[in-house]
Structures are given as structure tokens and as C-alpha cells.
């Protein structure tokens, strides 16, 4: 009898042992897991294997860990772990360990986690609203870092499309959409406060940043909590999904997906498959389901059910409680496994869960928990060994010392998990010394630090579409003020009539001279338009210097210089004895009462010659020519460069009715209905208006978006208080804006290890062409290094990346602002035509638009977004505005000489 019982017990024991043995992994098996993980890491990084890789290796656009010099006040959200938290994080200047945080935990009810996306984001925004009220911060528009602990395909630090929900979330209409957009939309729906969402951050990344703030060796972030995941600093050259080879970027591995391609089926058990089958995302996140808090209790429950069915537990009785999904939370697993608990206490925990157990049952349950959690810790250890060895090899080291920042309830609360994890890493990656530090403050602090690193000064330079639409509306009002008879005298945007009434119609012909003064080059051209079979244009041109002492000297000297250059050109062209019609592109604001009279209102950009403002430049030039007496010229038309550009482009595309310049300065002209132009008589037809939009903001309209750097630029300019819009966007100021930001960042130790050189402090040392070079996608970082080295600052890789970022923000702001003002012109044209859709062409010129690698694309994209009901063709003026000036001249001279009775002649000639 005794032996029968003993035999039965022994066989039961064996059954239990056999069951649990399926969870035991030998060193060889763990090494295999490590090797397979390594293969998947590589596959995730490579472009061609990425689509089928189970470990997605997502770029995060976080290029560096904090260096302790960050400061500021930030909001953070922390969504996706056990708790949803809203925080405010204050970082005091330049000192580590000087972070103060306030946070509130909010519940996310299951029906919201699994409801619609709109409900979820509305709920999040409601929690933010409550928090802002609670903190009394509703009216302070703070930058926000969003820890969002789910896989996102990022294309920038503030852009991330949700790949798929994981863990317990399953809200509809979110997968494939940009999480930042969804949050912005929800904020807009609530219409109660505004936030600048600066960064979207995975919790692993937030955790790495939180820990790196304390320990600079921390370059890996691990979460062992509800879910399981790792991020680490990877070499840019290995991340094929992102352009650029220099420096590092943090990669969110999303290793939870490991095994989705069946490569760890040998170690998955039937219980793992049960758990997977009953989850929200069957077949997915297989590694996560073997290793993380959300699932370990479920695996234990499946084993208990099976053992009970087989009569090995709970006297063979499967209770309703045991059938209840989710009763085993990680915290119970952790408690049951605690060595400090006596068996009786284990029993009482089981009883509290409604599982009526004997002492023997308690022993078995504890063993089951141990087997499951041990395997989880070992698997994470094997994965981590793959990562540290990869980093070691990346850096060509025999030995690597590195720190992992860790968070998550499983790691924090479980009595053995961390020890087993560390032992496994030590065994499987013997050439690495890996330290683990616990993140005490959660990943929200890290998200705030990322926000601080990135947006210390720059967040004020990013505009939402809403802000851009608002700027567009403001500019439309300015245009109306400029056009109205009553409002024009005090209007800032002058809306100057040009007396150009149509674009070229193809009948122009003749031999002309064009002067082109006011852009980066002073050019004189000869333009011959002939009409053999079809209209052809022949042009020859020469560039002349305009030395600074001349453009800043007396007006008569300036015009003597222009006349001298013209004489030289005519001599070279052997036409000194002819009196060719001259078109004069003069790229400054002029009041016209006819085509060949142009009173300079004010100098802009680099020019400041005395005695010219308030004078007719045609008279001044004629006087200078007459004084010489060696040739004669007939100046028939003065045109602004925007008008010249519109005419040049109009020659090729009859639909062209807008001309813009984004060069040294910026400006636009367009064809307005004459009946709307109070300053000119007549109601029929159209006339080109030179908006002089560079002066937008001179009355304070743009103060809310101007930064301290814009004010500094203005103070140091030739025309303080004037052309404020131009100073935020055009090429003459852009390099200088970047330089001022760099100086400020360096002063605060954020760049160049705080070194400031005399070159860096010299005005004009950083040019707009440098911004263009640095933003090139392939060689940009190399260029940054060259340019900064010339400024004597010995930049690190991180410095180069940061400078590239600054350039991008400044040039992006420019393109966005121009999109808004151009958008206003386009909507006005559309309204004038009274048509539901606008089809038009915009002629463009200017060095910034032409040379900057990303500018035109960004501009076009934003315009299309801001004015969706339009089909706009952007036509680059290939041959400058001189050709257009010749077209206007052709038209003027034809009217004067061939149609003396034309009713408009008087106005035009
Ligand atoms: C918290 C972090 O401390 O840990 C979260 O702030 C993270 O960002 C979480 O998601 C992970 O642990 P768990 O156990 O809450 O999922
Ligand atoms: C040139 C035009 O192509 O572009 C000029 O011919 C114009 O008239 C100039 O002023 C604007 O660009 P930038 O960059 O030279 O100021
Ligand atoms: C899941 C998510 C991942 C997150 C992890 C830890 O694996 O997919 O993004 O980091 O959980 O919370
Ligand atoms: C300045 C001038 C304007 C010109 C623009 C582009 O804004 O005031 O007339 O069109 O620069 O060159």
C-alpha cells in the first residue's frame, strides 16, 4: 500500500517535473537564442530584410543621451505601461540631479483601451486638461514629450505612425496613423489649451535617457514590465532606413516580436501557444509573451489548469476562478516566489485568489512560477547578450563596459528575475561588463530630457498648421489694408502698383538692355527677342561688382557706378552708338505712377546709399548717364525682381500670375483685379501688385512668433524695426540666425563642450550657403564638420548632428512662413476668380530657394496643405529677372512707338 502511494507520488512528481522541464533551457539553447536574436537584429537594420524581420529595429531620431546641461520646464505623458501618467518636469540649469517632477496617475478603463482611437485620445487630452488645471498651468504653452510605449515607424522625432498595438491596447483606427497627429487633433477638438508636441518616445528610450542623465555610460534601455523591449545606441551607418552615416542613433528594437517568423518554435511550449491564442494579438509578440509581466501569470495559469486536469493539483477540481483570465498578475507571481514567504503565506495568497490549495499544491504552484519566470529572465538575458556583443563589435572592442537602464514592474518587483537576467548575460557575453541601473523616476523624465535636448531654443520656431493658417489670415488682412485707399497710408504691407498689366503674350520682339540690381549679383544683360519661326530669346550677360563702400556711400556715387558698368557693357557689346531701350530690375520697394518712374520708398537688404530714398531712380540713373556723355540710354521700365521673375516665367507659361523671390531678400507680386486697387484709376483688367511682403510684421503683427534671435538680428541690421518678416525668412539673415542660436547653445554648454571661438562670435561667419550645405542628406554631416572646424570649434559627431538640426528648424520655419504668405495670395486669387479650384503657376527665383536641398519640397508641400483647393505649378526662373524686364520693356516701347494713340499709353510710358 505504502509503496503504491509512494509510486503514485513518484509518478506524479515525474509528470510535474517533465512538464516543468519544457521550461528549462540549457546553455546551448540559450546560446542559440542569442545567435538567432543577433540574426534578427541585423535583418531589422537592413533595408532589404527589414520588411520581413521579426525584430523591427525602429529608428527613434534620438541622436544622443543627455549630458547634464539640459534645462527647462516640460510636460510629459507616459502611456503604455501599467500606469498612465501626466507629468511636469523641471530641470534646473546645468546640474545633474536637479530635476523636480510632479505627476498624476490616471486610469484608462478597459473599454477605452479597446474602444475607438478618438475616444482614447480624447480621454488622454481630458487627463492632460485635468492635470493642467491641477497644476494651474492651463495658459502656459509648454513643450511636451510623449512616452508612447508601442512600436512606431518614426520619420522624425515628432512623427510616428503606430505599427500595431501590443499588450492590452486595441483601440480602433489608430494603426498606421501618426500618433502625434492624433494627439494634436484631440487637443484641437477640445479647444481649451495648446501644447507643442516636440517628441514621441518609446518607454525603453525614455528609460535609457532617464538613466543616462545619472550615468553617461548608459546606452541601453530595457523594459521588463507589462511588455518587454530594449533600445540601444546604434551606429548610423548600420541603420539603413535612415540616411547619413555619421554618429549614432538610438534604435527601438521591439524585440517582443522576436519569434514571429517561427524561429523559436523549438522552445515554445503548448502553454505559450495557449496564451498566444487567447491574446488580443495572436501570432504576434511571441518573445514578449514568453518574457513579460502581462503574460507570465497567464502561462502559469495555463500550466495549473493542465496539471489540475491531469489530477496533479487542486484535487483535480478546476474552479471558475482558475478559468478566469488574468487572475495571476505579475505582482502575485513576485510574491509567491519570494523566499521570505513561508508556504502557509503562499497558500493564503492562493486562497485570496480564490484557489483553494493544500500545502503540497502551494509547493507545486511555487515551482511552476519559478520555472516560468526563470525562463523569462534567461530569455531576456540571452537577448541582452546579443545586443551588448553587437555594440562591442560595432565599436571594434575586445572588451566592452556598458550600462543598461531598466524599468518595469517585473524587473522591480520580482525577487529573482534581475539576478537570473544578469547571470545569463554574464555567461553568454563574457567579453562585456554590463551594469544594470534601475530607473527610479520612470521614462517620463527621459522624455522630458529628450525634449530638452532637442528643443531648448527651437520649439518656438515650429509651427502647427493651425498657426500657419492663422498667419495666412493675418497676411490676407494686411493685403487688404494695403489695397484699400483709406488704409493704404498706414498699411505695413504696401501693395505697390507696378503698372504692368499683363504677362508676355508671345508677340514681344526687339533688342534690349536689362539692368538687374538688388539681388546677390548686379548683372547687365542684352536680350534679343526675335520672331523668325517661333519666338526665340538670346541673352548675353555680365556680372559687375558692387563693393560695400559704394552701396553704403552716396547715392550719386552708386548711380555713377551703375552708369559706368552700363557704359562698359555697351562698349563690350559694341552698341555704344545705339540707343537701345533699357529695362531696369530694381529690387527694392518703389512707388510708381507709371512704368518708367520709380520712387524708392526705403532701402532694404544690404543697400543704404544716401540721398536716394524718396527719389525717382530713373532720374538718378539718367542724370548719371548724361553726366558721362559717352552714350545714351532710354530707360523705359523699372520693375521689381518679383515682377521680372513673374514675366520671365510668364514667357514660358501663360498661366503664371505670381512671382516670388526667396533669395537675399524675399517678396512676392501677383496679378490683382484693377477694381480692387484703390490707388490706381480704372476698374477693367488686372495689374501686377508688388506686395513688399518683407515688411509684414513691422507693426507688431508677428511679435508672438518672433524669437529672441529674430530680435537680435533686427537690432544688428541696417534697418532696425523694418522688414521683420524678411529677417525671419530670407537668405541674407538665415545663416546669421543659425549662428546666434549656436553661440547661445555653446554658451550654455550644449554644443562644442562650451567652447566659443572668436570666429563663431563674428557676424556673417556663418552663411546661408552653409545652411544649405549642412542640410544635404548624404554629405551634410561631413560638411557640418568642415564648416564648424573652420570656425575653430572642433565639433564632435553629436555637435554636427545638433547643428544640422538647428539648420533644419530655421530653414523649415522659413519655408513654412513663406507657404503661409503665399497661401494668402493664392486664396485671394482664387476668390478673385470666384472659382472653387485655383489652377495657377508661381514663378520663383532666389538663391535660397534654388540652392537649399530641401527648401522647395517643403514649401510646395506646405502650400498644398494650406491651400488644398488648388493646383499650383512652381516654375523656377532659369534665366533671372532680366529677361522679364526686357519683356516689360518690349511692351512699353511698342506702346510708345507703334501705338501712340493707345489709351493706356500715357499711364504706361
Ligand atoms: C514605468 C515607465 O516606470 O515603467 C513607463 O515610466 C514604462 O514608461 C513602465 O512603460 C514599464 O513598466 P510596467 O511594468 O508599468 O509596464
Ligand atoms: C536673380 C534675379 O535670379 O535672383 C534677380 O535675376 C533677383 O532679379 C535675384 O533679385 C534674387 O535672388 P538672390 O538670391 O540673388 O537675392
Ligand atoms: C511592448 C511595446 C514596446 C514597449 C514594451 C514595454 O513590447 O511594443 O514598444 O517598449 O511593450 O512597455
Ligand atoms: C526686398 C525688397 C524687395 C525685393 C526683395 C527680393 O524685400 O524690398 O523689393 O523684391 O527684397 O529681392
Image (cartoon, rainbow, N blue to C red):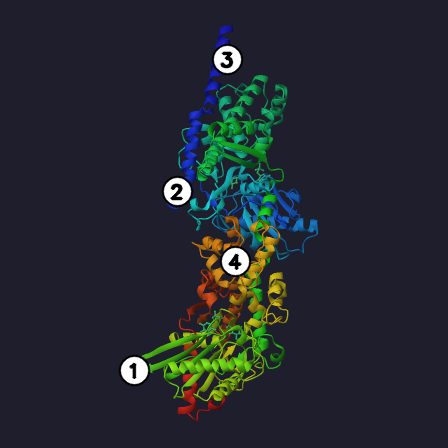
Q: Which residue is mark 3?
A: 9
Earlier sequence position, callout 3 versus callout 2: 3
* Mark in the foreground, 2 or 4: 4
In what element is the residue under mark 1? loop
Q: Residues within 10 Å of mark 2 (few under 14, many from 20)?
A: few
Task: Spot the residue most to the bottom.
Answer: 901
- Of the pair 592 and 87, the residue shown nearer to us: 592
Is residue 144 visible to the viewer in this orientation of the structure? yes
Q: Which residue is mark 1?
A: 532
Disc 3/disc 2 C-alpha distance (Å): 49 Å
Disc 1/disc 4 C-alpha distance (Å): 49 Å
Disc 2/disc 4 C-alpha distance (Å): 35 Å
Q: Which residue is mark 4?
A: 807
In what element is the residue under mark 3? helix
Q: Residues within 10 Å of mark 4 (few under 14, many from 20)?
A: many
Q: Is mark 3 within 8 Å of ligand 1?
A: no
- Of the pair 287 and 43, the residue shown nearer to us: 43
Label 2 close to label 4 by CB (< 8 Å): no
- Of the pair 579 and 287, the residue shown nearer to us: 579
Earlier sequence position, callout 1 versus callout 3: 3
Q: Residues within 10 Å of mark 3 (few under 14, many from 20)?
A: few
* Mark in the foreground, 3 or 4: 4
Does residue 807 sit above or below 50 in this rendering?
A: below
Q: Which residue is mark 2?
A: 52
Amino acid at each position: 500500500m505504502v509503496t503504491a502511494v509512494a509510486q503514485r507520488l513518484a509518478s506524479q512528481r515525474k509528470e510535474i517535473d517533465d512538464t516543468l522541464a519544457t521550461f528549462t533551457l540549457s546553455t546551448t539553447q540559450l546560446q542559440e537564442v542569442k545567435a538567432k536574436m543577433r540574426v534578427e537584429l541585423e535583418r531589422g537594420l537592413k533595408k532589404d530584410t527589414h520588411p520581413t524581420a521579426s525584430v523591427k529595429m525602429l529608428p527613434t531620431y534620438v541622436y544622443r543621451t543627455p549630458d547634464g546641461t539640459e534645462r527647462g520646464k516640460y510636460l510629459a505623458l507616459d502611456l503604455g505601461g501599467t500606469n498612465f501618467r501626466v507629468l511636469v518636469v523641471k530641470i534646473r540649469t546645468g546640474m545633474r540631479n536637479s530635476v523636480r517632477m510632479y505627476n498624476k496617475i490616471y486610469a484608462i478603463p478597459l473599454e477605452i483601451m479597446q474602444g475607438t482611437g478618438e475616444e482614447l485620445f480624447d480621454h488622454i487630452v481630458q487627463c492632460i486638461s485635468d492635470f493642467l488645471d491641477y497644476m494651474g498651468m492651463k495658459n502656459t504653452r509648454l513643450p511636451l514629450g510623449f512616452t508612447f510605449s508601442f512600436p512606431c515607424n518614426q520619420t522624425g522625432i515628432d512623427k510616428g505612425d503606430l505599427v500595431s498595438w501590443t499588450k492590452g491596447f486595441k483601440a480602433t483606427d489608430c494603426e498606421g496613423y501618426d500618433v502625434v497627429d492624433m494627439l494634436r487633433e484631440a487637443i484641437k477638438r477640445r479647444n481649451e489649451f495648446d501644447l507643442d508636441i516636440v517628441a514621441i518616445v518609446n518607454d525603453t528610450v525614455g528609460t535609457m535617457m532617464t538613466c543616462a542623465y545619472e550615468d553617461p555610460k548608459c546606452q541601453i534601455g530595457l523594459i521588463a514590465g507589462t511588455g518587454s523591449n530594449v533600445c540601444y545606441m546604434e551606429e548610423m551607418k548600420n541603420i539603413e532606413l535612415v540616411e547619413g552615416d555619421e554618429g549614432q542613433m538610438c534604435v527601438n528594437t521591439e524585440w517582443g516580436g522576436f519569434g514571429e517568423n517561427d524561429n523559436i518554435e523549438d522552445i515554445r511550449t503548448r502553454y505559450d501557444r495557449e496564451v498566444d491564442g487567447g491574446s488580443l494579438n495572436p501570432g504576434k509578440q511571441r518573445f514578449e509573451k514568453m518574457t513579460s509581466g502581462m503574460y507570465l501569470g497567464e502561462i502559469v495559469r495555463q500550466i495549473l489548469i493542465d496539471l489540475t486536469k491531469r489530477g496533479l493539483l487542486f484535487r483535480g477540481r478546476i474552479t471558475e476562478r482558475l478559468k478566469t483570465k488574468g487572475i495571476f498578475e505579475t505582482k502575485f507571481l513576485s510574491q509567491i516566489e519570494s523566499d521570505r514567504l513561508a508556504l502557509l503565506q503562499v497558500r493564503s495568497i492562493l486562497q485570496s485568489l480564490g484557489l483553494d490549495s493544500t500545502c503540497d499544491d502551494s509547493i507545486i504552484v511555487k515551482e511552476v512560477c519559478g520555472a516560468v519566470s526563470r525562463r523569462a529572465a534567461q530569455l531576456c538575458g540571452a537577448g541582452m547578450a546579443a545586443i551588448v556583443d553587437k555594440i562591442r563589435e560595432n565599436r571594434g572592442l575586445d572588451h566592452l563596459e556598458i550600462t543598461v537602464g531598466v524599468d518595469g514592474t517585473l524587473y522591480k518587483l520580482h525577487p529573482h528575475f534581475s539576478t537570473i537576467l544578469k547571470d545569463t548575460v554574464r555567461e553568454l557575453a563574457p567579453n562585456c561588463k554590463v551594469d544594470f541601473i534601475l530607473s527610479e523616476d520612470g521614462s517620463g523624465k527621459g522624455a522630458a530630457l529628450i525634449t530638452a535636448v532637442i528643443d531648448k531654443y527651437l520649439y518656438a520656431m515650429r509651427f502647427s498648421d493651425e498657426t500657419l493658417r492663422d498667419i495666412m489670415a493675418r497676411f490676407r488682412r494686411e493685403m487688404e489694408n494695403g489695397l484699400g485707399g483709406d488704409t493704404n497710408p498706414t498699411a505695413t504691407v504696401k501693395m505697390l502698383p507696378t503698372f504692368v498689366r499683363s504677362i508676355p503674350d508671345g508677340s514681344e520682339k526687339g533688342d534690349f538692355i536689362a539692368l538687374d540690381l538688388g539681388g546677390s549679383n548686379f548683372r547687365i544683360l542684352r536680350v534679343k527677342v526675335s520672331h523668325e519661326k517661333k519666338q526665340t530669346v538670346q541673352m548675353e550677360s555680365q556680372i559687375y561688382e558692387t563693393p560695400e563702400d559704394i552701396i553704403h556711400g552716396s547715392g550719386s556715387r552708386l548711380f555713377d557706378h551703375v552708369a559706368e558698368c552700363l557704359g562698359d557693357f555697351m562698349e563690350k557689346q559694341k552698341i555704344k552708338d545705339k540707343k537701345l531701350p533699357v529695362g531696369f530690375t530694381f529690387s527694392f520697394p518703389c512707388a510708381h505712377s507709371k512704368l518708367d518712374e520709380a520712387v524708392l520708398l526705403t532701402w532694404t537688404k544690404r543697400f543704404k546709399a544716401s540721398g536716394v530714398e524718396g527719389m525717382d531712380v530713373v532720374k538718378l540713373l539718367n542724370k548719371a548717364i548724361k553726366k558721362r556723355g559717352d552714350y545714351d540710354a532710354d530707360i523705359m521700365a523699372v520693375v521689381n525682381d518679383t515682377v521680372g521673375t513673374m514675366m520671365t516665367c510668364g514667357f514660358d507659361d501663360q498661366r503664371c500670375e505670381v512671382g516670388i523671390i526667396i533669395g537675399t531678400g524675399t517678396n512676392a507680386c501677383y496679378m490683382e483685379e484693377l477694381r480692387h486697387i484703390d490707388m490706381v484709376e480704372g476698374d477693367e483688367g488686372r495689374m501686377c501688385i508688388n506686395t513688399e511682403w518683407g515688411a509684414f510684421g513691422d507693426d507688431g503683427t508677428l511679435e508672438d512668433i518672433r524669437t529672441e534671435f529674430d530680435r537680435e538680428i533686427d537690432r544688428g541690421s541696417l534697418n532696425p524695426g523694418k522688414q521683420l518678416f524678411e529677417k525671419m525668412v530670407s537668405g541674407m539673415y538665415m545663416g546669421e540666425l543659425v549662428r546666434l542660436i549656436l553661440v547661445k547653445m555653446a554658451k550654455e554648454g550644449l554644443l562644442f563642450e562650451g567652447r566659443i571661438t572668436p570666429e563663431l562670435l563674428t557676424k556673417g561667419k556663418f552663411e546661408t550657403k552653409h545652411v544649405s550645405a549642412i542640410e544635404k542628406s548624404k554629405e551634410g554631416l561631413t560638411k557640418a564638420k568642415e564648416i564648424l572646424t573652420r570656425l575653430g570649434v572642433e565639433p564632435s559627431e553629436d555637435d554636427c548632428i545638433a547643428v544640422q538640426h538647428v539648420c533644419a528648424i530655421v530653414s523649415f520655419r522659413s519655408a513654412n512662413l513663406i507657404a503661409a504668405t503665399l497661401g494668402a495670395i493664392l486664396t485671394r486669387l482664387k476668390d478673385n476668380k470666384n472659382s472653387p479650384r485655383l489652377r495657377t503657376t508661381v514663378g520663383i527665383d532666389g538663391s535660397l530657394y534654388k540652392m537649399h536641398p530641401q527648401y522647395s519640397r517643403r514649401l510646395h508641400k506646405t502650400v498644398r496643405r494650406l491651400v488644398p483647393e488648388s493646383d499650383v505649378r512652381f516654375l523656377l526662373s532659369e534665366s533671372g529677372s532680366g529677361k522679364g524686364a526686357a519683356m516689360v520693356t518690349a511692351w512699353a516701347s511698342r506702346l510708345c512707338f507703334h501705338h501712340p494713340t493707345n489709351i493706356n499709353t500715357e499711364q504706361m510710358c
